[in-house]
Image (cartoon, rainbow, N blue to C red):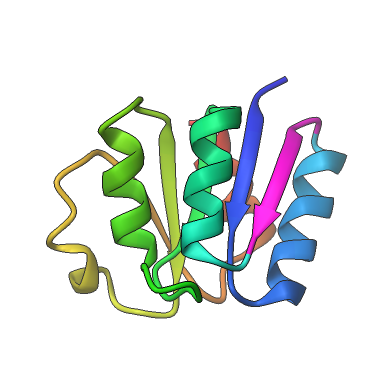
Amino acid sequence: MKSVFIVEDEVVISIFIKMYLEKKGFNVIGTSTNGKEALEIILVKKPEIIIVDVSLKGGINGIEVVNKIYEHYQPKIIFITGLDERALRCVKIKYTYLRKPFENKQLLAAVQN
């Protein structure tokens, strides 16, 4: 069972993702709405998959969170955002992109691949 951490500033979306992935057998080890807090937790728990929104509370955005994590280890990254993928052009790591709103089957495919 793969471990997942969700970094999403919209609590309703975070709860939906958490419930759906747990139903599909994934171990959601935490969630956060705050970029700085998420970074601190992720660096301790080291989930295999991180689902992260670009726009976050806490002074750092999802791209900055991911870049800092990659300095320590390289989990699978899934960006979920309402922004066009061009907003991620400064991201220099391998990632999967889901544009909000997305369907359950898109989310499942992203975490399984």
Asked whether 23 falls inside the magenta stretch, the response is: no
Which residue occupies the extreme top position in the image? 1
Residue pictured at 18% horizontal, 54% vertical: 91
The answer to whether 6 appears left or right of 11 in the picture is left
Residue pictured at 18% horizontal, 71% vertical: 86
Of residues 111 and 56, the one drawn nearer to the viewer in this rendering: 56
Q: Residue 28 at x, y = what percent?
A: 74, 39
Query: In terms of image quadrants, where is residue 42?
Result: top right
Query: In terms of image quadrants, where is residue 54?
Result: bottom left
Of residues 41 and 19, the one drawn nearer to the viewer in this rendering: 41
Magenta highlight: main SS: strand
Q: Residue 60 at x, y = what percent?
A: 36, 68
Tell me the quadrant of the picture where the N terminus can be found: top right
Residue pictured at 29% horizontal, 58% vertical: 64
On screen, residue 20 above or below 61:
above
Q: What range is drawn magenta here?
A: 25-32
Residue pictured at 82% horizontal, 40% vertical: 22
